[in-house]
Image (cartoon, rainbow, N blue to C red):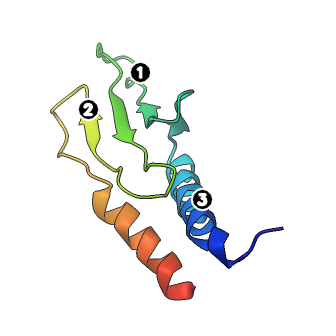
Amino acid sequence: MADYNDLPELIGKLKLAAIDAYMVHRGFIISGDGAHYARVGTPIPGVVSVPETVTVTCPNEAGQGGGVTTQTSSSRSSLSYVDDFAEIRARIDDAL
């Protein structure tokens, strides 16, 4: 049974789970090693192009950090999930 000493660890796990759900909802998959999220865009039918891959760093086990994005194509504006992750963590902190 958990006690109050376990709260920081449990809150960190809650933050990580919430961010994982947020990213999966946006079409990303979680890498096997848990270090990043990945999404591969499909090319437009009839257009010769290479699918774009977007990777985003995951938060650590305490739910902190992550959100840094890397793309295989610079044709789109630069994405970042750092602020989104911070907002998710803040909402959890406010609720608790």
Q: Earlier in the sequence, mark 3 or mark 2?
A: 3
Mark 3–mark 2 Cα distance, whole angstroms, equals 27 Å
Residue situated in front as seen by the camera: 28 or 10: 10
As displayed, is residue 7 above or below residue 76?
Answer: below
Q: Is residue 15 left or right of residue 86?
A: right
Q: Which residue is mark 2?
A: 71
- Pointer 3 residue: 13
Report the disc number at residue 16.
none
Identify the image quadrant of residue 71.
top left
Instruction: Determine whether the residue tagged by mark 1 lies in a helix, strand or loop.
Output: loop
| 66 relative to 18, above or below | above
Instruction: Looking at the picture, tell me which residue is in the foreground, 5 or 22.
Output: 5
How crowded pointer 3 is (Cα within 10 Å; few <14, some 14-19, many 20+) is rated as some
- For marks 2 and 1 on the same chain, the one whose residue lies earlier in the sequence: 1
Q: Which amino acid, mark 3?
A: Lys
Give the residue pinned by disc 1: 45
Answer few, some or many: residues within 10 Å of disc 2's Cα (few below 14, many 20 plus, some between 14 and 19).
some
Give the alpha-carbon distance from disc 1 to disc 3, as whole Å.
Answer: 41 Å
Up the image or down, 43 lies above or below 80; here it is above
Residue at x 36%, y 34% (from the top left corner): 55
Q: Which element type, helix, strand or loop, lies under badge 2?
A: strand
Q: Position of residue 6 (x, y in %)?
A: 65, 68
Q: Residue 87 or 50: which is nearer the viewer?
A: 87
Percent of width and height locating residue 80: 26, 52
Disc 2 from disc 1: Cα separation: 21 Å
Q: For the residues labelled 1 and 3, say whether their Cβ atoms are less than 8 Å apart.
A: no
- Identify the secondary structure beneath mark 3: helix
Query: Along the polypeptide, which appears first: circle 1 or circle 3?
Result: 3
Q: Please, what is the three-letter code of the amino acid marked with disc 1?
A: Pro
Q: Nearer the viewer, residue 95 or 41?
A: 95
Residue for point 39% across, 62% down: 85
Amino acid type, label 2: Gln
